[in-house]
Image (spheres, grey):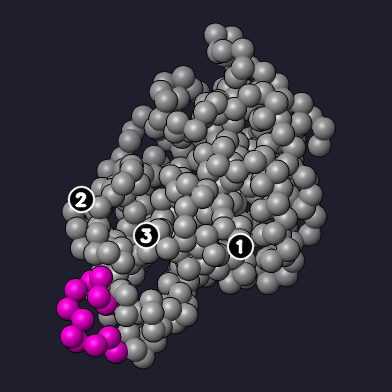
Amino acid sequence: MVSLAGCQHTSPTEPAAASAQIHGVKTYLNQDNLQARYPSYDTLVTEMRQGGVDAVFTTLYEGRKAFYASQIIPERDTAIDLGRLRESAKKQHVKFGAICQIFYDADTLAQRPDLVPIDQHGSGEFVNWQRLVCPSDPGYRQYKLSIVKEIASTIRPDVVSLDFMRFPTTWEIIPAEAKPESLRNFCFCDRCVRGFQQSASVVVPPALDTIPKRAAWILANHNAAWIKWKTGLITSFVEEAAREVRAIDPAIEVSVHVVPWAESVFDNALVWNAAQDVTALSRHVDYLSPMIYHKLIGRPTDYIRTLTAELATKTKRKILPSIQTAEIVKEGQLSADEFKQSLDNALAPPSAGTLIFHWGELRPDAQAPALRREKSEIFKAAAERR
């Protein structure tokens, strides 16, 4: 197992030194009845260790409900205490990553409809479960920053992992063959258009009296400035969050979840659509963690290795790809061989390791289907080779 004792923090301004690869999992105790299965977090962590896991990344809150003793988030799920899980992980030398959901918050949107993002067609319709928030509101940004700071100071995780750190895009359901122009482009709400005009010293003609007209004019005449403004909003939040976390504890590392799009995908939609400029983001983080659920997005298993290498070359940072182990929506089940290929690609140099989505698909269970048990053994065997 990877010991955290004596671990030194790597400056985000210098390339990360080589280190032992992470063999981690994501887990969500508020889903799949997992909390009920693990009244003792020591038991959970012991099972993870026995299965080859040396890192657990978990969501500390969802919307207005906290899974730890928060003084900021208004509601509390008292059945889940991730402060205790963090202590169990620490005792057994398992790296603990605190996933912080930033621009995803269905509960807040229900109270603040002005935060609903608007696309270039003037639509604020949500097309799946993701209730993503417009990233430009200063009050909302400060609220989420205060939560990140609280988690850093009270939970003291090994890693603060920033999730939904992007402009809205439902990348999980966009077909691989989609045309770039078919993607929804956010956000053209009044607040965003005002902020863009002030930042870029641009004046949108008053005669453009609808959102589609304003959006078309901005994209046709000031697209580069628009992209710069969008990526600046995302990068500036990451910069401030990283600075605040390290002021609390310089040993805490910072990670950012990345949409799994290579530069060639949808004409570099990672930048113009999701507003994730990985080169700019890399100046402030220790890890970039692309969510390369290859089957979900219609890509071959070797796409995992290709994208990981591309991000490492661009950023000179540790890349921690997250991969799927089973069907997520309706894309089809992964065979044991496909999972092994995915894992091999995820661990291939220059990868810093991998995070499996999710622990529920690997945990030991004698009653589990044979395929799931076979995948658990594949993961464990890979971990034992480190």
- Circle 1 residues within 10 Å: few <14, some 14–19, many ≥20: some
**Looking at the picture, which amino acid does disc 1 mark?**
Glu
| Chain part drawn in magenta | 203-214
Above or below, 177 relative to 83:
below
Label annotation for residue 184: 3
Give the mark nearer the N terminus: 3 vs 1: 3
Measure the alpha-carbon separation of dots 3 and 1.
18 Å
| Residue beneath disc 2 | 110
**Residue 343 sits in quarter:** top right
Q: Is mark 1 on a helix, strand or loop?
A: loop
> Is any part of residue 170 visible from this angle?
yes
Residue drawn at the location 75% of the way across and 37% of the way down: 344
Give the mark nearer the N terminus: 2 vs 1: 2
**Looking at the picture, which amino acid does disc 2 mark?**
Ala
Is residue 165 in the magenta section? no
Q: Is mark 2 on a helix, strand or loop?
A: helix
The mark closer to the camera, 2 or 1, is 1
| Residue beneath disc 1 | 263
Q: In this view, does 379 lie to the left or right of 165?
A: right
Q: What percent of the width, then of the height, locates residue 240?
A: 48, 70
Q: Is residue 326 left or right of residue 127?
A: right
Measure the alpha-carbon separation of dots 2 and 1.
35 Å
Q: Is mark 3 on a helix, strand or loop?
A: loop
- Circle 3 residues within 10 Å: few <14, some 14–19, many ≥20: some
Q: What percent of the width, then of the height, locates residue 280?
A: 58, 72
